[in-house]
Amino acid sequence: MIALGCDHGGYALMQEVIDYLEKQNIEYQNFGTYSEDSCDYPVYAKKVAHAVADGNCEKGILICGTGIGVSITANKIKGIRAALCGDCFSAKATREHNDANILAMGARVVGAGLALEIVKTFLETPFSNDERHIRRISQIEQ
Ligand code: RB5
């Protein structure tokens, strides 16, 4: 189950992400926002971060205008490793090296075509399970 959240700046791109997930038969839970009316990104970033941190959702995707506000917010929640990605190399590397559990993107930064490739890469890339990466991730929480 993938937790989804966005603000008004990310709403249009999130509809594209939802279309992609539905075509791939990937289950999701949409925590909003549900329109392009102006809203506060921390509200939605926290909902998604808690759903992932509590284990109710396996991963999350957050979108705002830049991706910065939602990633800063999500990373305040214990156990969350939110990665702001604007390219597929970073999306792959952050899954392999950081076991990132939330993907953050900026709708004013990446176009829909690239964003969907980033989503695909993030969701399909497993954590490497390398000892050095496990050690470094454990140090984040210490
Ligand atoms: C909203 O205008 C914008 O500030 C928000 O989407 C995001 O970019 C914040 O980091």
Image (cartoon, helix red, strand yellow):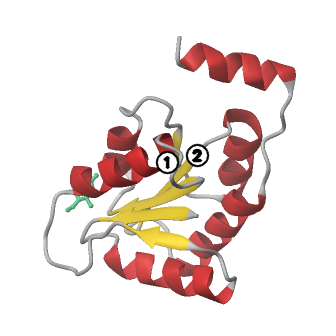
Q: Residue at x 31, y 47 (%)?
A: 46
- The residue identified by callout 2 is 101
- Which corner quadrant of the image does residue 73 belong to? top left
Q: Amino acid at mark 1?
A: Val
Quarter of the rendered structure image containing ligand 1: bottom left
- Residue density around tag 2, few if under 14, some if 14–19, many if 20 or more, within 10 Å: many
Residue 111 appears left or right of 107: right
Residue at coordinates 65% horizontally, 89% vertically from top-left?
23
Please report the residue visible at 26 percent of the width from the left and 71 percent of the height from the top: 33
- Observer-side mark, 1 or 2, equals 1
Q: Secondary structure at mark 1?
A: helix
Residue 92 location in percent, x, y?
Answer: 74, 51
**Other-residue count near label 1 (Cα within 10 Å), few / some / many at <14 / 14–19 / ≥20:** many
Q: Under tag 2, what secondary structure? A: loop
First of labels 1, 2 by sequence position: 1
Instruction: Find residue 22 and report its image quarter.
Output: bottom right
91 shown above or below 130: below
Q: Residue furthest top?
A: 142
CB of mark 1 within 8 Å of CB of mark 2?
Answer: yes
Q: Position of residue 125 (x, y in %)?
A: 78, 55
Where 33 falls versus 83 (above or below)? below
